[in-house]
Image (cartoon, helix red, strand yellow):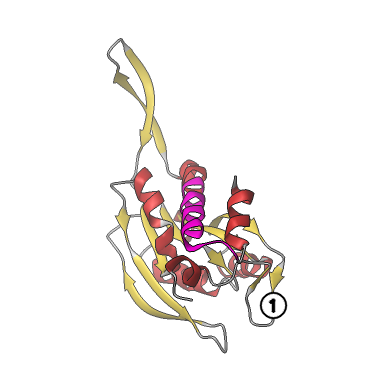
Amino acid sequence: MKKTLITILRNRNTSLEQYRQAADQLATVLAVESDGLVPKATFFVDTPITRTQGEGYTQKPVLVPILRSGLVLLPSFMRFHPGAGIGFIGTRRDEKTAIPQLYYTKLPPFSHDNPILLLDPMIATGGSAALAVQILKSAGAMEKQITLISFIASPEGIAHLKKECPELRVVVAQVDEGLNDQKWIIPGLGDFGDRYFGTL
């Protein structure tokens, strides 16, 4: 299913409606795949028939989309974690240098027990994600409690994150071939945010 949805996102002829639908479905797939990263415990519940053992979350996660494209993943993760704290980190990439710049931060309270799910659909150079991790660490997070969740990544971006954030966990649907001279992912899918929000 991931490959099918990514193919729809790659296709330059995909309509806005189809693009949004595929992105939302892929976000749901990743939300399900990421469930194992949220701590759980077993406990007993009473059914209408008898008592049985079940499982539930021990800590609420903190969801942190990187603006603006990370907002696309947020609704799917909120459906599975309706009580989660939600924060926002806004970065923009300098088109000449490809260096990310921070322009907004708003984070909820959290402890070292709360898993932090950092949401960003594209990992190109890895600079924006690495900057977001540093922001979270400066707010008191431990790197090992942060998981970055993404649709597509470049090998260069993954390597950069492993170097800068060695304890960061990464969940990605597809690792692509690499980056071109403009630091765009190849084959990629273009500018994800512009295509999703219709701002081409």
Residue drawn where x is 63% and y is 78% of the image: 183
**Is residue 135 depicted above or below 50 in this figure?**
below
Report whether residue 109 is seen: yes
Residue at image location 46% in from the left, 65% down from the top: 196
On whether residue 162 falls in the magenta region, the answer is no
Decide if residue 20 is on the left or right side of residue 5: left
Magenta region: 13-29
Q: Nearer the viewer, residue 198 or 190?
A: 198
Give the camera-side residue of 200 and 87.
200
Residue drawn 68% across the image and 67% down it: 187
Nearer to me, 74 or 170: 74
Residue 74 in percent (x, y) is at: 39, 56
Please provide percent x and percent y for residue 12.
61, 67
* On screen, residue 88 above or below 116: below
| In this picture, residue 167 sits left or right of residue 145 | right
Name the residue at the bottom extreme: 96
Q: Position of residue 52 (x, y in %)?
A: 36, 16
Residue 19 belongs to the span the image colors magenta: yes
Judged by its main secondary structure, the magenta piece is helix
Q: Amino acid at mark 1?
A: Asn
Q: Which of these two is toward me, 109 or 101?
A: 101
Q: Quadrant of the N terminus?
A: top right
Where residue 186 sits, quadrant-wise, is bottom right
Figure quadrant of residue 102:
bottom left
- The image position of residue 88, as x and y in percent, is 35, 67
Badge 1 element: loop
Query: Residue 142: in sight, yes or no?
Result: no
Residue on which disc 1 sits:
180
Mark 1 is surrounded, within 10 Å at the Cα level, by few (under 14), some (14 to 19) or many (20 or more) other residues, namely few
